[in-house]
Image (spheres, helix red, strand yellow):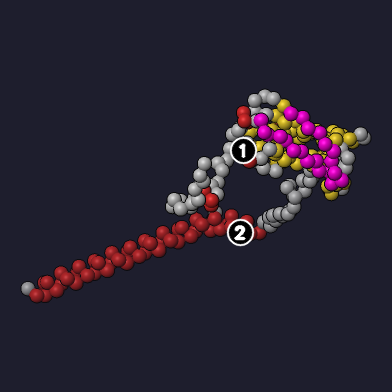
Amino acid sequence: MQPRIWKQRKLNTTLSLYLKCGAILLLFLLSVLIVACSDGTGAANTTGSLNGPVVTVTIHLGDGYGNSPTPTLPDYTCGAWATQTTPPMNMASNVGVYAKFVHNVNGNPEGVDGATATALVLWPDGTNDTLTTNTTPDGLATFSIPIADKASAVNKITLVKVTFSKPGIPTCTVDVDRAAFFTLVIVSPTASPDNGNGNGNGKHHHH
């Protein structure tokens, strides 16, 4: 009985060994076949690529944006601005507006002296005021705009256009799109220390 069992085990072991060897041989043959195909196509292409001309990429720094011409400044420029954009109407009687007239000489700004500067104040209610002055040697013009009777302009934007003119040179205008602007506001007065410190201990005024 035992010899028969031993023979059966030996047969099973032999079959298993043959199957493993067959599988290994099959894998080896497949590997050889794949390598042979690669040598005929992929390897040839790779060799051709390596032996072909070398592609050179050159990057030119400074092309495009760097070589675009720098825009030149106009010969004459002007601008205007308010000294306060939200002046308190109940605490001031005037609003200051500055304007400047400049001549650009080789890229360097030089003020235009003695030019006539005319300010046109565009109030929100549709009315206009005109003020005129002359520029100083640095091209600066200063305007003082009365606001005492302009309650209708409170909390609304007021625009100020300015036009510069001088014989022999072009006129320059600060138009609506670049005009100086301000908005009148009402500011509540701040309580003084004499009117109390919040604890009822301040001075009392008798009438």
Tell me if I can see residue 79 in this picture.
no
Residue at point 72% right, 31% down?
121
Mark 2 → mark 1, Cα distance in angstroms: 90 Å
> In the structure shown, which secondary structural element does the residue marked by tag 2 occupy?
helix
The relative height of residue 9 versus residue 45 in the rendered view (above or below) is below
Q: Position of residue 137 (x, y in %)?
A: 87, 46
Q: Please, what secondary structure does the residue beneath circle 1 have? A: helix
Q: Quadrant of residue 5?
A: bottom left
Residue under label 1, please give it: 90
Specify the label residue 47 is tagged with. Answer: 2
- Of pointers 2 and 1, the one earlier in the residue sequence: 2
Q: Position of residue 92 (x, y in %)?
A: 66, 40
Residue type indicated by callout 1 = Asn
- In the depicted structure, whether residue 22 falls above or below residue 107: below
The span shown in magenta is 129-149
Q: Main secondary structure of the magenta part?
A: strand
**Outermost residue toward the top in this view:** 126
Q: At 30% from the left edge and 66% from the top edge, which residue is drawn?
A: 20
- Which residue is nearer to you in this view: 166 or 34? 166
Residue at (25, 67) in percent of width and height? 16
